[in-house]
Amino acid sequence: MVDRENDEEDVQIEECSVCGGDIIIDSYCEEDDIVYCNDCEAEYLIRSLDPIRLKLLDDDADADDADDSFDEEFE
């Protein structure tokens, strides 16, 4: 049986830079794992666990748009 009280001690909560919601980082998370905001579902890459450093992955969407326009020019 899982003891939820002990599990909660191993959970860290960070604030989402997009909406201010909660990003839950469990004890089993490792560097380079992806975690999500519970409110807006923004994706974050765990860059470091001690101290916790997260990188917003939605920034890559702009780069993908630029690549699509490049392909359209040469079709």
Image (spheres, rainbow, N blue to C red):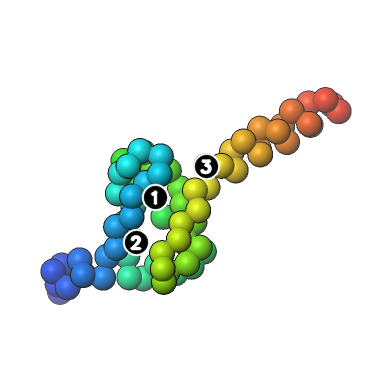
Find the distance from the CA under tag 2 to the CA under tag 1: 9 Å
Q: Residues within 10 Å of mark 3 (few under 14, many from 20)?
A: few
Image point (36%, 71%), residue name:
28
Q: Is residue 34 at least partly visible in the picture?
A: no
Using residue 6 as the reference point, say whether residue 17 is left or right of it. Answer: right
Q: Secondary structure at mark 3?
A: helix
Q: Residue furthest right?
A: 74
- Secondary element type, mark 1: strand
Residue at left 66%, top 32%? 65
Say whether marks 2 and 1 touch (CB < 8 Å). no
Q: Which residue is mark 3?
A: 58
Give x and y (percent) for residue 10: 26, 70
Give residue 36's mark: 1
Under circle 2, the secondary element is: strand
Q: Sequence order check: which comes first, mark 2 or mark 3?
A: 2
Tell me the kind of residue under disc 2: Ile
Which residue is label 2 attached to? Answer: 25
What is the spatial separation of the Cα atoms under label 1 and label 3, in whole angstroms? 11 Å
Residue 66 rendering spot, x and y as whole percentages: 70, 33
